[in-house]
């Protein structure tokens, strides 16, 4: 595609393609096969678009779309930089697998309102691309809100009272934090720095004292509710009421990733790592993130519902990224970026597996999974790979991020972070390995009705992501290169 | 063409006035509508021409009857006046196609022609307040528009409309009386009624006789505040909006209160602001305090309303609070935000009230419980409602965000961080009351009362879509809204002592 279009065109195409799909999907309301073809075509086109931006980016170009100047200090513009590229690659790549999986899941479970589902999904992806390529804080904020709103109908897809209760928590918490904390932080940033553009090295260096910096950092860290930092994490387990592919979207493809991505980008390109390190204002963030990692792991340990356990695991893993940011060593920021990628592929595998079990065996509790690995070897095999990656055992992707973060913690002698990472690894093992053990080594109960593997699209999708989890370990070159470019001036 | 050009300020008033008379003689509802339509569609061109003229060659002064000011009545239009003229006539032109079928459904056929007559008189009055440069002439136009408004509200289908109209009549008359008493004070002190002349003559008068000037300021402020429904002088508004015919509600919410706000801005910044040290008085503090009260109390009341029209009415009181907050901030960015919101709120509220008007047209009710699942029956109407609702909240990408951004910047220029916090917190209350409606109309199962509901006919649908599109459009292209407001604010703030 790079032959056909200039990089600048490709940038806005990345937002336009999923949006066009959202407009086209309702046209084929009555023909599900054509409708799903639209989604898949758009997903593949989007991925190709993002991939063709890679070469110019690595060649040193930073293609941008000079957008619309809206008002004093506000302009809507897109610009490709390495970290956003990494996020866009993950999200657009996973949209393909998630679409394949969605088709199997939504049809396998005879879900109603499928057209609306695919429309909202496409809008959510468009918003994600906007977040990834945002040139300034305003653009990021705009797409951030669009992502919240477009995912609300997905979270409440079942339209039950319980779904609405969760939906209200979801919308209330995400919109609430973004408007009450995130927006004031943006206004303050503009008032202090006179610009909202993401700039390598940050825009606040030398302009804020320790007090203001600490307040701003807190406004951003908690205002970006999608990062699920405790105590603002509870929307994520509540949103588990949604269908599994939506959970995958929330946990792996877009929503929470957008949160930690935004925090990482803001720390690196608004505050500046060196600036924050010299002001020494991140100890509290290390402690909050560390507490979230450990507390969420402990809660996960006690959940019998598989999706709930995965949800708390996400809360815990997200704070790894924040922890990597808070260590404030360049190498740990690289680790944080790597962890965004690693967690995406691993967690999507785990959710796909959970949905696969639900579709084939109609089981959702861990205590019911005795011996299920014998009937669903592909599913549980993939689950095992995802679990190993969550724990951080090579050769899986999860190892890399942790390795860099540990290195960073060593360099800066941050013993709190070091301790948290080590202890949480043990906890991760404690809540994931029993599931694997149960599935493969316990006898299946006599009473259970016979069932086989899930529908083929589901198996294809989860095998692909499991393979990706391992592949990312061996071929981490691109991801690593992008992460390194991020911290380069 | 050359001979018409200088007469435009007068034509802006004369055409709708003659239209009103013509309609009164026609007596046939459909003909009356056609005349009203023709007048409404002609007016924006005149307004646009006037605005363009003020922006290129400066303020326009038109001497009525050839008598030069300050003896004769002067029509004086500056950029602010042109901006408000364009807002009033433009919004009316876009919403007027909605009127015919809505009026046919809600008002007795024998009264259709009178209704359009009243509408055009009200329209004349509002445009008149905006063009005139004469304090007493403004009072006359204020009364023309108010009397017509009382009649239009009383035409509401619900019998409570009569009570609402009577309530507004009493309060509106008190407001007008206060205003005219204030003008009387000014005339006593200075011997002139011309606003520009007043401003210069008040300068020595304010030194000689400060109590009289302050009394005039107080009377005029309270009088106009009653008309613009500044909290806590808003009590007439919810009932009037809830029980008036749907189209009247749309028209009033988008134009009438806006023109009253214009008049207040005129007195604050072009008359008193020039003559006395305005910032030394507690006026701005009082405005800010009352605006905040409106933003919070009215929004919270809106959350508990079960009638969607009343809910939107309380939301209007709250949103007027944002506009007056911008006035109270009395600095460049703040006033820009207030004036931008004047425009943006007119558009967003027009979309919301039009959508609810369409619902009333189809199912005859606007109670929240009757609307469950109506989104699936009236998808375009409710999508428009949702977009405008997001605008009201101030979601980025809509017009509402732009106003709030400038208001926040205005608060920051004073260093008032708490005010920034209060602005965003109050927006959260809007999330609750808008969200509550959206959840009912989109996510509840469709009620049995909605069997025959569907999107309204084409002529009613178009205005709804136009205003929803405008809500998004002005969230990105702000040259007309914030751009002009910025120019105006610079002139007004720069002219202050």
Image: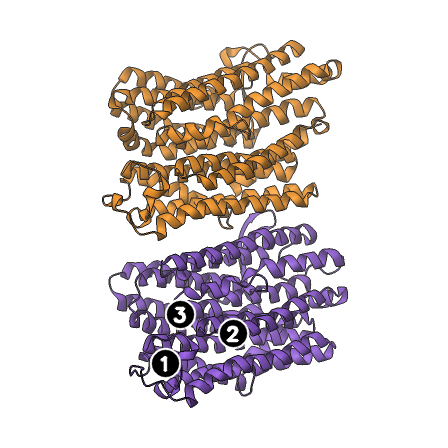
Q: Residue under label 1, please give it.
A: A460
Cα gap from disc 3 to disc 2, whole angstroms: 24 Å
Circle 2 residues within 10 Å: few <14, some 14–19, many ≥20: few
Is B191 left, or right, of B65 in this rendering?
right
Q: Residue under label 3, please give it.
A: A245
The location of residue A122, given as percent across then percent down, is 40, 63
Quarter location, residue B335: top right
Quadrant holding the N terminus of chain A: bottom left
- Which of the chains bears the disc numbered 3? A
Of the chain colours in the picture, the one used for chain A is: purple
Q: Residue under label 2, please give it.
A: A302
Chain that appears orange: B
Quadrant holding the C terminus of chain A: bottom right
Cα gap from disc 1 to disc 3, whole angstroms: 14 Å
- The verdict on a common chain for dots 1 and 3 is yes
Give the residue at the far left of this rendering: B452
Q: Nearer the viewer, mark 3 or mark 2?
A: 2
The location of residue B91, given as percent across then percent down, is 42, 34
For the question of whether residue B41 can be seen, the reply is no
């Amino acid at each position: 595609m790079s032959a056909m279009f200039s990089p600048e065109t490709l940038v806005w195409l990345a937002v336009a393609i999923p949006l066009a799909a959202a407009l086209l999907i309702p046209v084929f309301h009555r023909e599900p096969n054509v409708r799903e073809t639209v989604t898949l075509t758009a997903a593949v086109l989007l991925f190709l678009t993002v991939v063709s931006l890679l070469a110019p980016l690595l060649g040193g170009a930073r293609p941008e779309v000079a957008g619309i100047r809206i008002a004093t200090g506000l302009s809507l513009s897109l610009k490709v930089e390495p970290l956003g590229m990494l996020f866009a690659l993950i999200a657009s790549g996973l949209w393909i697998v998630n679409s394949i999986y969605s088709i199997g899941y939504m049809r396998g479970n005879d879900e109603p309102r499928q057209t609306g589902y695919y429309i909202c999904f496409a809008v959510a992806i468009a918003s994600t691309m906007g977040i990834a390529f945002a040139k300034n804080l305003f653009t990021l904020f705009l797409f951030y809100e669009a992502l919240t709103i477009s995912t609300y109908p997905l979270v409440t897809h079942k339209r039950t009272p319980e779904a609405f209760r969760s939906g209200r928590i979801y919308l209330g918490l995400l919109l609430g934090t973004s408007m009450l904390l995130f927006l004031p932080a943006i206004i303050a940033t503009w008032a202090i720095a006179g610009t909202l553009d993401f700039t390598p090295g940050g825009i606040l260096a030398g302009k804020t004292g320790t007090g203001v910096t600490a307040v701003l950092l807190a406004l951003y860290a908690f205002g970006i509710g999608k990062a699920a930092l405790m105590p603002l994490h509870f929307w994520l387990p509540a949103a588990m009421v949604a269908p599994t592919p939506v959970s995958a979207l929330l946990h792996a493809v877009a929503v929470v990733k957008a949160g930690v991505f935004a925090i990482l980008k803001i720390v690196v390109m608004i505050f500046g790592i060196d600036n924050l390190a010299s002001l020494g204002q991140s100890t509290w963030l290390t402690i909050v993130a560390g507490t979230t990692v450990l507390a969420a792991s402990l809660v996960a340990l006690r959940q019998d519902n598989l999706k709930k356990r995965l949800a708390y695991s996400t809360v815990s893993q997200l704070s790894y990224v924040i922890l990597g940011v808070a260590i404030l060593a360049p190498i740990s920021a690289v680790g944080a970026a790597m962890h965004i990628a690693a967690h995406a592929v691993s967690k999507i595998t785990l959710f796909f597996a959970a949905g696969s079990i639900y579709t084939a065996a109609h089981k959702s509790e861990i205590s019911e999974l005795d011996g299920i690995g014998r009937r669903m070897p592909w599913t549980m095999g993939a689950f095992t790979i995802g679990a190993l990656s969550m724990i951080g055992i090579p050769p899986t992707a999860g190892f890399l991020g942790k390795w860099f973060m540990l290195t960073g913690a060593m360099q800066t002698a941050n013993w709190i972070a070091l301790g948290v990472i080590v202890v949480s690894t043990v906890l991760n093992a404690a809540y994931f390995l029993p599931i694997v053990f149960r599935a493969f080594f316990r006898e299946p109960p006599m009473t259970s009705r016979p069932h086989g593997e899930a529908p083929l699209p589901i198996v294809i999708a989860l095998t692909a992501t499991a393979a990706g989890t391992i592949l990312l370990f061996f071929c981490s070159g691109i991801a690593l290169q992008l992460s390194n470019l991020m911290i380069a001036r | 063409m050359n001979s018409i050009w200088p007469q435009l300020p007068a034509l802006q008033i004369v055409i709708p006035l003659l239209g009103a008379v013509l309609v009164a003689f026609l007596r046939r509802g459909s003909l009356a509508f056609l005349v009203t339509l023709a007048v409404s569609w002609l007016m924006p061109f005149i307004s646009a021409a006037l605005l363009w003229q003020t922006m290129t060659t400066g303020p326009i002064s038109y001497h009525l009857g050839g008598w030069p000011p300050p003896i004769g009545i002067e029509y004086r239009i500056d950029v602010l006046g042109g901006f408000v003229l364009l807002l009033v006539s433009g919004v009316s032109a876009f919403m007027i196609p909605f009127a015919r079928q809505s009026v046919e459904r809600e008002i007795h056929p024998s009264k259709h022609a009178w209704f359009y007559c009243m509408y055009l008189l009200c329209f004349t009055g509002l445009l008149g307040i905006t063009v005139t440069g004469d304090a007493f002439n403004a009072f006359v136009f204020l009364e023309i528009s108010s009397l017509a408004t009382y009649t239009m509200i009383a035409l509401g289908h619900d019998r409570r409309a009569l009570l609402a109209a009577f309530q507004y009549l009493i309060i509106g008359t008190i407001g007008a009386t206060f205003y005219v008493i204030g003008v009387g004070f000014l005339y006593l002190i200075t011997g002139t009624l011309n606003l520009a002349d007043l401003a210069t003559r008040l300068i020595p008068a304010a030194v000689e006789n400060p109590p009289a000037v302050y009394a005039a300021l107080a009377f005029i402020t309270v009088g106009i505040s009653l008309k613009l429904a500044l909290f806590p002088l808003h009590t007439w508004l919810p009932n009037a909006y809830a029980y008036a015919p749907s189209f009247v509600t749309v028209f009033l919410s988008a134009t009438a209160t806006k023109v009253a706000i214009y008049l207040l801005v005129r007195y604050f910044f072009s008359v008193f602001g020039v003559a006395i040290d305005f910032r030394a008085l507690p006026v701005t503090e009082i405005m800010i305090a009352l605006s905040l009260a409106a933003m919070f109390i009215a929004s919270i009341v809106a959350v508990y309303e079960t009638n969607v029209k009343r809910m939107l009415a309380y939301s209007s009181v709250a949103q007027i609070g944002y506009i007056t907050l911008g006035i109270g901030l009395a600095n460049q960015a703040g006033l820009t935000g207030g004036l931008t919101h004047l425009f943006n709120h007119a558009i967003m509220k027009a979309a919301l009230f039009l959508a609810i008007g369409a619902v009333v047209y189809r199912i005859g009710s606007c109670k929240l419980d009757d609307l469950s699942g109506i989104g699936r029956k009236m998808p375009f109407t409710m999508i428009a409602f949702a977009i405008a609702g997001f605008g009201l909240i101030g979601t980025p990408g809509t017009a509402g965000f732009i106003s709030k951004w400038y208001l926040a910047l205005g608060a920051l220029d004073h260093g008032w961080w708490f005010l920034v916090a209060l602005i965003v917190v109050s927006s959260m209350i809007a999330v609750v009351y808008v969200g509550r409606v959206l959840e009912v109309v989109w996510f509840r199962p469709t009620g049995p009362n909605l069997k025959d509901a569907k999107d309204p006919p084409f002529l009613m649908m178009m205005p709804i879509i136009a205003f929803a599109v405008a809500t998004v459009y002005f969230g990105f292209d702000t040259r007309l809204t914030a751009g002009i407001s910025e120019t105006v604010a610079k002139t007004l703030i720069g002219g202050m002592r």
